[in-house]
Image (tube, rainbow, N blue to C red):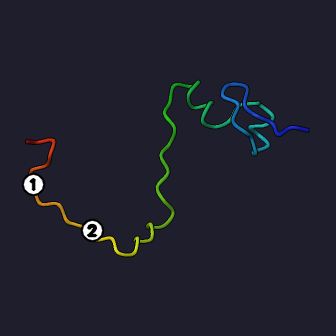
C-alpha cells in the first residue's frame, strides 16, 4: 500500500481530515486564494561556534547602496 498523497501537488498526507478530502492544508489554502501561514521557529536557533553577530548601524552603506 502506498502512502496517501494530495491530488493537487502529490505531497504526502498524514492528517485523517486531509486524507479524507485528498487535499493537504497548503493546497487548500492555495485553492482558496489565501497564502500559507508562516511559522515562527519554536526556539531561537543555536549559535554556530566561532560565528560573531555584527550589529547593523543606521544608514550603514552596503554593496547595494553604492
* Residue linked to disc 2: 53
Q: CA distance from mark 1 to mark 2?
A: 16 Å
Q: Tell me if mark 2 has few (under 14), some (14-19) or many (20+) residues whose alpha carbon lies within 10 angstroms of its own.
A: few
In-front residue for pair 23/61: 61
Nearest to N terminus: mark 1 or mark 2: 2
* Residue linked to disc 1: 60
Q: Picture coordinates of residue 22 (x, y %)?
A: 76, 30
Q: Picture coordinates of residue 53 (x, y %)?
A: 27, 68
Q: Are marks 1 and 2 in contact (CB under 8 Å)?
A: no
Q: Quadrant of the C terminus?
A: top left
Asked whether, in this view, residue 40 is left or right of residue 16, the answer is left
Q: Quadrant of the N terminus?
A: top right
* Identity of the residue drawn at 56% across and 25% down: 32
Q: Picture coordinates of residue 8 (x, y %)?
A: 68, 25
Q: Tell me if mark 1 has few (under 14), some (14-19) or many (20+) residues whose alpha carbon lies within 10 angstroms of its own.
A: few
In-front residue for pair 19/58: 58
* Identity of the residue drawn at 46% across and 55% down: 40
Asked whether, in this view, residue 25 is left or right of residue 41, the answer is right
Q: Identify the element where label 2 is drawn.
A: loop
Above or below, comparing residue 35 to residue 33 in the picture: below
Q: In the image, which disc is placed on residue 34?
A: none
Q: Picture coordinates of residue 27 (x, y %)?
A: 62, 31
Determine the residue located farthest toward the right in the rendered image.
1
Determine the residue located farthest toward the bottom in the rendered image.
49
Instruction: Please identify the quarter of the rendering in which residue 20 is found.
Output: top right
In-front residue for pair 62/35: 62
Above or below, comparing residue 66 to residue 45 in the picture: above
Above or below, comparing residue 59 to residue 11 in the picture: below
Q: How many marks?
A: 2
Q: Identify the element where label 1 is drawn.
A: loop
* Identity of the residue drawn at 13% across and 49% down: 62
* Identity of the residue drawn at 62% across and 30% down: 28
Amino acid at each position: 500500500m502506498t502512502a496517501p498523497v494530495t491530488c493537487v501537488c502529490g505531497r504526502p498526507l498524514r492528517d485523517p481530515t486531509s486524507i479524507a478530502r485528498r487535499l493537504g492544508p497548503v493546497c487548500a489554502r492555495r485553492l482558496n486564494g489565501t497564502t500559507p501561514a508562516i511559522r515562527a521557529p519554536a526556539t531561537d536557533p543555536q549559535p554556530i561556534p566561532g560565528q560573531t553577530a555584527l550589529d547593523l548601524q543606521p544608514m550603514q552603506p552596503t554593496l547595494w547602496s553604492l
